[in-house]
Image: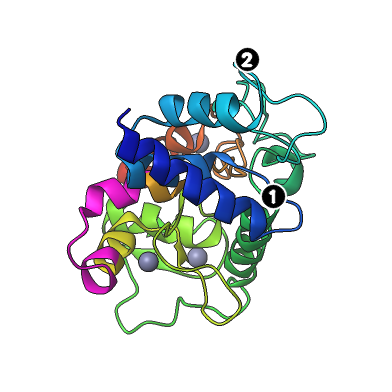
Amino acid sequence: MSYKQKKFIRNWYKDFVESDEDPFLANEHLMYLAMLAKATPQAVWEYISRKFLGSTTDGPAGNLPLAGGLRPLKHSKDTNSSSPGYSLAKANRHLSQQTLQLVEKYVSACQRRRAHSDGRRKKNDGPFTCTFGCGYRTGRAFDWRRHEETHEPQELWLCSLCPQNSEQNPFLVNRKDKFLKHVKEVHKGWNADDVLQTSRVDFQAKFDPVCPICQETTESWDDRCKHIIGHFEDDV
Ligand SMILES: [Zn+2]
Ligand SMILES: [Zn+2]
Ligand SMILES: [Zn+2]
């Protein structure tokens, strides 16, 4: 990294540590900083560890400015998002406290949405039926899946460019198209795909693996959706 990049990282990191009583450099901060500094997250992390944490190991030791330190970038495969005992907070321990709170709020609002039915649209027919019981129906598999995800979001993006403070609501959304639209409208001049990448929340979503039609167990959300679409297509 160049002198300029290092200086930028030092300044950013000092501000970051001072801005919070309990600073926690979560993955998304690191990704964001790496994007701003035009360096790889790995290089940024190594530099911060060396400069501020007096270590070159992969994680910070005790009594350091980082409260929890950087958690591993990848969560273990055995985080079981389909188990009946799924807890959003537990499955997403690797997120920063602030992000976790936003995610919990967002996801529970989505899960509550089924109460006020959005199935009362004028054109509400087709073989693809909402499995969350809101009455929505559609003729297009793509729309059906997108609808299912309004009840149980699977992917989330938290805009890394929007200031996250009490005066302005952070921009958090579960649809890629809406996120890209936000960047193009609000952050002109930024590369939307870069921002998409740095804003992606490493979110472990919940999903019910049991097919509501044949009770077969599916492996993943993607698998579940394809499986259920198969039933609806059989009905056509
Ligand atoms: Zn629905
Ligand atoms: Zn934004
Ligand atoms: Zn089935």
Residue with the most extreme top position? 57
Q: Dividing the picture into quarters, in which one does residue 226 lie?
A: top left
Q: Position of residue 171 (x, y in %)?
A: 45, 68
Locate residue 178, reporting x and y percent: 31, 64
The vertical placement of 226 against 200, above or below, is above
Q: Amino acid at mark 2?
A: Thr
Crowding near pointer 2: few (<14 within 10 Å), some, many (20+)?
Answer: few
User: Mark 1 sits on what residue?
Assistant: 23
| Place of residue 232 in the rendered image (x, y in percent of width and height, measured from the top left) | 37, 47
Separation (CA) of disc 2 from disc 1: 20 Å
Q: Residue at x 59, y 65 (%)?
A: 106
Residues 236 and 193: in front is: 193
Dominant SS type (magenta): helix
User: Is the residue marked 2 within 8 Å of ligand 2, measured from its CB?
Assistant: no
Q: Which residue is mark 2?
A: 57
In which quadrant will I find the N terminus?
top left
Q: Residue at position x 41%, y 42% from top?
A: 7
Task: Assign ligand 2 to one image quadrant.
Answer: bottom left
Question: Looking at the picture, which amino acid does disc 1 mark?
Answer: Pro
Is residue 217 in sight in this rendering?
Answer: no
Q: Secondary structure at mark 2?
A: loop
Q: Is residue 86 magenta?
A: no
Q: Is residue 186 magenta?
A: yes
| Along the line of sight, the residue nearer the viewer: 112 or 178 | 178
Q: Is residue 209 left or right of residue 45?
A: right
| Vertical comparison of 194 with 171: above or below | above
145 versus 220 height, above or below: below
In the image, which residues are magenta? 183-197
144, above or below 121, in the image: above
